[in-house]
Image (cartoon, rainbow, N blue to C red):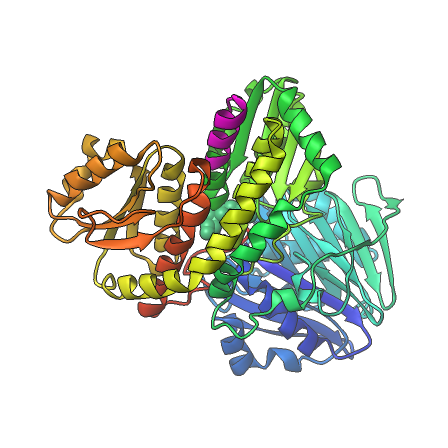
Amino acid sequence: MCGIFGVVGHRPAGPILLEGLKKLEYRGYDSCGIASVSEGKLHVRKGIGKIDEVEQRHGLSGVPGTVALSHSRWATHGGVTDQNAHPHTDCAGRIAIVHNGIIENFQELKRELHQKGHRIASQTDTELIAHLLEEFPGSLETKMAQAAARIRGSFALLAVSTEEPHKMVALRCESPLVIGIGSDAIYAASDVMPFLEHTDQAIFLEDHEMAVITPGAVSFENVRTRSSVNKKPRTLQWTAEQAGKEGHPHFMIKEILEQPAAIQNAMRQDPDKLEKFVQLIRNSRDVKFVACGTSRHAALVGRYAINRLAGKTAEVYIASEFSYFADQSTPDTLIIAVSQSGETADVLVGLRKAKAKGAKVASIVNVVGSSIDRESDASLSLNCGPEIAVASTKAFTAQLVVLYVVAHALAGKSAEGTAALKQVAAHAADLMPQWNETTRALAASWTEHEHVYFLGRGVNFPVALEGALKLKEISYIHAEGMPAGELKHGTLALIETHTPVVLLNPHDYTFVDTLSNGSETKARGARLIGVSDRSNEAYDAYIPLPQVAELFYPLVSVLPLQLLAYHAAVLRGHDVDRPRNLAKSVTVR
Ligand code: M6R
């Protein structure tokens, strides 16, 4: 969703914010803006478009002053217009704010503020907060605490005021916010990415916590109790280099190619944390995976793995649907939350509801210190470094690895699992160049197609879902992933001459049935693309897989499908890392 970033320091804030904002752009890129306080005035520059475009038009980096805040928007309330771009200001032009989240009672607030004579310039829920702050007397933090009591919803807010030109206030309520402590500046941001090149010292805010930042100092308080909170920085493991493109044209291709190493890194789990995680599974009668998008596809593979290896059954819920079942949780329930960002709102809402009923939570996240990580009874990390491209790739494979590690530990077969995973990593490294070439050529023959189907059975079915999701989200080609056996119950009607059908068909327990479903599509004119460790005369095109143990095919078969989606998107001329309408971290419901 939206990204917010502010700085209080001694150097000009504009260039720092511009660079940081680019690192947050993956959270939203409809519009962006910066506001600074200097010489008793607010300086606001903003507009629609990507950051570089807005910088060219409005000179964001040229704002004067050393105290400033910025925003990269993913529209929720109000269209994509210059007026709706953040920062927003109060009537007097003394207060500027940026916001990530959603104000649920915005209609009520809007009516009230309107009646009180506030001039509301945009259609956003955010602007109302600037006017609400204007209503209250006192310091900026007092205003903020009083405003917070009136706002319902999820929000991370930064505010500055001309009346206190050396101060910034940052408040969190259900939307992520982290403070970076640098040697010559203090930062506040939606995640650590924008300040990673300045400091590795971070303090994560909890709900209802507010940071009051002045040059060289930051204090914390709970806005509900107005009591001070003692918080200590933690040292981040990620580096600024990991967050760069390293010569690749897009983050997505860099992240795809990193996967052989990501597999190795994800295998390295702290033994105590792993044991704690596994014990929670052993001790729970009711195990439920809760996740969204790509992370849910990983959970589907995880369900197979723990079932086949350890005989443990589990359900997998789409997080946004889980909240309707969460009330049925009991102390015997274990929620396994799978999330790259660790901030996905639907997952957080579900796990909080389940916790309220006594459930335990175990999570698998990439962002250590994220809300899901912090709110879990046990947590394992993906260890795959920052994932920037909106389309998730290396986080998916790392999630699979962690789930395989967990399933093997649960079955008392850790050594076996480690050996198999090492082999998979080696195969992935060997085949990556060949997959890159094959899929580039295949994608070139697809640029005209508007519909593609991905079929698989058993443990390969989630990869069909993932292959389709990747293709959809960046190439905008309509794609469906489905269990191969389900096709003849309706979707087969859509297969026409030359419709591409990608068949996830390794020589495992699903091979014979899957091939027969593929042949049914071919008999209706489909162009069959076999993804398998053995070629077959039924295939019109073939993507080779290495031979691995049955359970591990998803880990290798997903790699060429990611490349296929990538090349299709590049060939169709799309902005691969920033697909339209999407954002990396979905912090609203
Ligand atoms: O951060 P999370 O893993 O919780 O995010 C879940 C989904 O939003 C995410 O996987 C999404 O589906 C990706 N853009 C897919 O590539």
**Above or below: residue 175 compared with residue 75:** above
Task: Answer whether residue 139 is magenta in the image.
Answer: no
Query: Residue sitting at 59 percent across and 55 percent down?
Result: 126
Left or right placement of residue 96 versus residue 489 in this view: right
Residue 495 visible? The answer is yes
Residue 376 visible? The answer is no
Query: Residue sitting at 77 percent across and 46 percent down?
Result: 209
Residue 62 in the image, given as x and y percentages of width and height: 65, 82
Residue 372 in the image, given as x and y percentages of width and height: 65, 40
**Above or below: residue 71 compared with residue 102:** below
Query: Which quadrant would the N terminus be assigned to in this image?
Result: bottom right
Left or right placement of residue 567 versus residue 258 in this view: left
Q: Nearer the viewer, residue 343 or 309?
A: 309
Query: Residue sitting at 69 percent across and 48 percent down?
Result: 368
Q: Nearer the viewer, residue 277 or 586?
A: 277
Residue 578 in the image, given as x and y percentages of width and height: 46, 63
Residue 79 image-quadrant placement:
bottom left
Left or right placement of residue 355 versus residue 424 in this view: right
Give the extent of the magenta segment: 301-314
- Type of secondary structure dominating the magenta stretch: helix
Task: Answer whether residue 305 is magenta in the image.
Answer: yes
Q: Nearer the viewer, residue 520 or 102?
A: 520
How many numbered markers are drawn?
Answer: 0
Residue 273 in the image, given as x and y percentages of width and height: 72, 36
Residue 41 image-quadrant placement:
bottom right
Left or right placement of residue 540 versus residue 116 in this view: left
